[in-house]
Image (cartoon, rainbow, N blue to C red):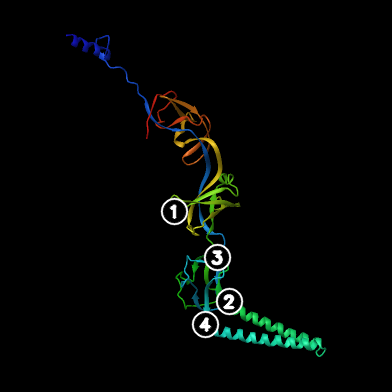
Amino acid sequence: MKRHLLKVALLLPLALVGCDGAVTAPPVEFRIPVEVAQVREDAVEDRIMTTGTLRARESVILNVETPGFLEIGRADGRRIAEGDFVESGMLIAETTGEDARLAARLNATRLQLEAARQELERRQQLFDKKLASEEELSRTRATYESALHDYEMSKRTSERARIVTPIDGVVLKLARDSDGRPMADGQKVLAGFEVAHIAPTDTLIADVNLVGPELARVRPGQEVMVSHYAFEGMSLPARVLRLSPQMDPRTHTFRVEVEVDNPAGLLKPGMFVQAAIVAERREGVSTIPREAVAKRAGRNVVFVIDGQRAAMRIVSLGVGERTTIEIREGVTPGERVAVRGLETLTDGTRVRVITP
């Protein structure tokens, strides 16, 4: 009997009795689940996102000067090809077929030059001994100078059959016919035929376009990060080189030249790239995730979580990135703000912090 009474005494505090004698459960307090992030003191960048096309900063086009049969040069035992790196002074191609005639002409002018030189020396000695007139010496000197000119012209003509690159660079185009097909060795070419297009690619230029308001935030020397979809997760350092002073009347944009470092040669002229121009960088500022900012009555607000309650604060936004934004007023580093579950929050709402 005593044991039964003890059980009843223990159960009575767990129930409430209403006026009509009905037993009711105690009220349950509902708390909105939220995820939070900490306000950090960090650096943040204001980036202008744009796109552009790469081109070589400089290039040379090598043309045939002496017609003949084309022979492409060799490097490391194989025929030079498009995409190869070549050094200044390297033989890219030569034209053959008139070698014998050119060699004979060069030899003849060399012999004439040597004979004229000897005659000039002999005439000079006679003049010094007063055995020849000044007029005779002048005629002999004129003959020598004419022979020297003929020899140098023959030598230059012979050298024109050899096509040499004057710069280090990558072969962008090599010996293609009028239909764009690669040419085999031994095909006849005329003077003016384009043999090769060569350009350095360790530094490239990206031509990007900006509208007026964006251009006002850009100046030469600003940092830029350039990327290409083929190299996911990798960006190459670059910098703003120059701004166009004129607007393109067709696109209503301004061209900006961006100098891109490309030491490994991954990027190629003609590629379409993405560019992020760093218009402003701020250090040591309060930053939060963008999703922590909400709109209430047209104002930017965040919900600071303190214990089990959310306190709404009006904030002043600063420089922003894709996922992070600066808060100039309204929060301090170390505080926690809601980043999920903001839709139904108001000032003073009871919350329950959850982990993602």
Expressed as whole percent of the image width and height from the top left, the position of residue 14 reads 27, 15
Residue 110 appears anywhere in the view: yes
Q: Which residue is drawn at 56% across and 59% down?
A: 57
Q: Give the Cα distance between marks 3 and 1.
A: 26 Å
Q: How far apart are marks 3 and 2 (CA)?
A: 20 Å
Position of residue 344 in the picture relative to residue 199 (left or right): left
Where is residue 184 drawn, in percent x and y? 45, 75
Q: Distance between the residues labelled 3 and 4?
A: 29 Å
Counting residues from the N terminus, which is met first, the one under dot 4 or under dot 1? 4
Of the numbered discs 3 and 2, the one sitting upstream in the chain is: 2
Number of the label disc, if any, that sits on residue 97: 4
Q: Label 2 belongs to which residue? A: 160
Q: Where 95 sits versus 256, above or below? A: below
Q: Nearer the viewer, mark 4 or mark 1?
A: 1
Q: Measure how far apart labels 4 and 1 are at the Cα level.
A: 47 Å
* 3 or 2: mark nearer the eye: 3
- Which residue is labeled 3 in the image? 168
